[in-house]
Amino acid sequence: MTKHQHNKGRASEPHGRDAPDTAPTYFECPQCGFLSADLEFGAGNGPCPFCAAPGDSRRVFPAERLRRLDGRIRRYHGEGESEIVVILVAAFLEAILEDIIDRILAAHGADVTVREVVLDGQRAIGGRIGRLFPHLTGEQFEEAAAELGYSDFPARWREVRAARNAFIHDSPFNAPQETIDASMAKQSMDLLGQAYRLFVLINNRFVADTHVPRCAPADGL
Ligand SMILES: [Zn+2]
């Protein structure tokens, strides 16, 4: 299957893409979790294309804490701080992965306690990608990324994690890497930009697609 065959349901491109010093803005349907960069959708004009919920109370995605972290990363990149960029992008990608797994768990009907227990029980990034993600979605992360048009993303993400780990951790087998060069910082910035689009597509496929209501209706009690 080519990557172009899977464009159905592709989120529209976020505005802000031409102004790369800020995080892109998406809007979220609070009923089904569908995400879109469409400004009309964000303004609440018309029903949700997935669940037909009315347009009020659409929320901004990503959350403010990730937006602030994104802003710091871009600032450090502008200042040529390659080490800090790689370390913070690695942290950012892990935070956004946690966010997406949490959303998938919620779409499966897990309440906040269950989500906490599951995520606490699998804190390592390798386990979250290698075990949690396929259990919850029925697909390997690498397969899902490739089908959504981002086949290089997982391997490039692994390289950034390896560069971060080699820089931070001492090891009896390998000497710590003394520096992280500008090309790894550039690769990290590329991943940061792609991460939003890939994770929104994953969201729309595995969260919005389930059609499970996110909140129990408050009737009958
Ligand atoms: Zn919806």
Image (cartoon, rainbow, N blue to C red):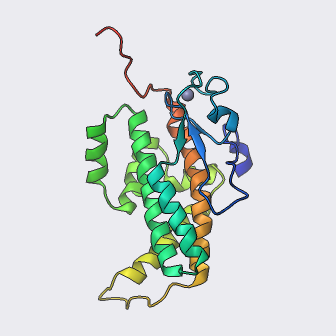
Residue 140 position, x and y percent, is: 49, 52
Front-most of residues 154 and 27: 27
Q: What quarter of the picture does the C terminus occupy?
A: top left
Residue sitting at x 63%, y 23%: 47
Is any part of residue 100 visible from this angle? yes
Asked if residue 2 shows in the view, the reply is: no
Question: x, y percentage for residue 152?
Answer: 61, 63
Q: Position of residue 51 (x, y in %)?
A: 57, 24
Residue 74: name its quadrant: bottom right
Q: Is residue 17 above or below residue 12?
A: below
Q: Is residue 119 left or right of residue 187?
A: left
Q: Is residue 143 above or below residue 176?
A: above
- At 54% from the left and 42% from the top, the residue drawn is 60
Q: Please say if 71 is above or below 53.
A: below
Q: Position of residue 25 (x, y in %)?
A: 60, 48
Does residue 48 appear left or right of residue 30 in this picture?
Answer: right
What residue sits 57% from the left and 62% below the top? Answer: 192
Identify the residue at the far top of this view.
Answer: 220
Q: Observer-nearest residue: 182 or 172?
A: 182
Taking depth in this image into account, of 83 and 100 the one nearest to the observer is 83
Residue 181 higher or lower than 15, as above or below: below
Quadrant field for ligand 1:
top right
